[in-house]
Image (cartoon, rainbow, N blue to C red):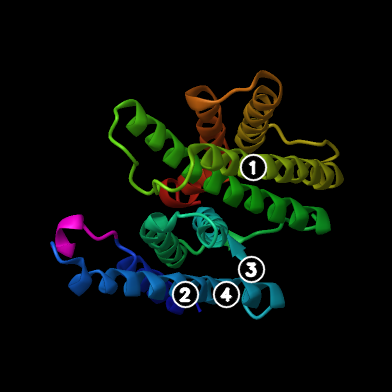
Amino acid sequence: MNGLAFALYMLAALLSRPTEPSTLGGEAGATAPAPLRSERWSTWIMPIAWLAQGGGFALVLHGELQPTFGFAQALSVTFWLVAAVYWVESLYYPLQTLRSWICLLAAVSIVLTWLFPGMLAAPPGAGAAFALHWAMGIASYGLFGAAVLHGLMLWAAERSLRKRKGAAAGVSRSLPLLTLEKLTYRLAGVGFVLLTASLIFAATFSDRLWGRPFEFNHQTVFGIAAWLLFAVLMAGRAFLGWRGTRALGWLFSGAVLLMLTYVGSRFVLQVILHR
């Protein structure tokens, strides 16, 4: 299933590559339909790749495959969720020019799961609270990943406007910046709710296993620090009207800490320390 997903993601990335205006020539009627046709193909190849990748996750949930987890698996699920959010939005907003990059990142994340298979996920006796913590945490990863992608587009578009260069790469001229901004922080808001739920479930199973809500380690420190940064961002947006680079700075800083919480630490353990 992952092999099929990888092939389809790469095909969608190839078909959705932006075409240089010079390749269309002076007479658009002869050459313009080709990129439009490839764009339509990639629109439907991408969700098929997404379903194939989701089929691999379904086999794990059904018990057909041994559940393992590591930094590569976290990235794979994150980009799987980012691809889902992006594809749905692209049906309503002109974001199609980003499809090539998203499909390429999703394909690379699948390759990483082959190279770094990870280990068994749940500690003995963790119960349902661990599964809920894991599910909410990965869902928040995906939503914050999508929010960061939108935030990068927003930052690039605002920078292009200040320099009077027109639309930024990946952002259509027909997409208002206010709409892009609303999408960015709407995703961040839902991600913050899921991250909060993930920390609550983490405290639940930690208290059951070790008699205290949190273990004092790097994951706890980075996770709570990321939550605090996102909480400040949400409060600043709601009560102080934060916008522009100030709000984006808090979003990007929180996302970096959130990435270090699990993906970064597991990368160090698996790849550098071989543990």
Q: Is residue 91 above or below residue 155?
A: below
Disc 3 or 4, which lies upstream in sequence? 4
Give the residue number, with chain letter if any, for mark 2. 44
Gap in Å between the C-alphas at discs 2 and 1?
26 Å
Q: Position of residue 35 (x, y in %)?
A: 28, 69
Give the residue number, with chain letter if any, for mark 4. 56
Gap in Å between the C-alphas at discs 3 and 4?
11 Å
Is 23 included in the stretch rendered in magenta?
yes
Quick check: can you spot residue 11?
A: yes
The boundaries of the magenta stretch are 18-25
Disc 2 or 1, which lies upstream in sequence? 2
The quadrant where residue 144 appears = top right
Under circle 1, the secondary element is: helix
What residue is drawn where x is 57% and y is 75%?
Answer: 56
What residue is drawn where x is 84% and y is 41%?
Answer: 207
Amino acid found under the numbered disc labelled 1: Arg
Is 92 included in the stretch rendered in magenta?
no
Nearer the observer: mark 3 or 4; the answer is 4
Q: Is residue 168 above or below residue 97?
A: above
Under circle 2, the secondary element is: helix
The residue lying toward the viewer, choosing from 102 and 89, is: 89
Nearer the observer: mark 4 or 2; the answer is 2
The quadrant where residue 41 appears = bottom left
Gap in Å between the C-alphas at discs 3 and 2?
29 Å
Give the residue number, with chain letter if any, for mark 3. 67
Report crowding for label 3: few under 14, some 14 to 19, many 20 or more residues within 10 A (C-alpha). Answer: some
Looking at the image, residue 94 sits to the left or right of residue 183; the answer is: left
Q: Is residue 52 above or below residue 220?
A: below
Give the residue number, with chain letter if any, for mark 1. 186
Amino acid found under the numbered disc labelled 2: Trp
Q: Position of residue 59 (x, y in %)?
A: 63, 77
Q: Position of residue 5 (x, y in %)?
A: 46, 74
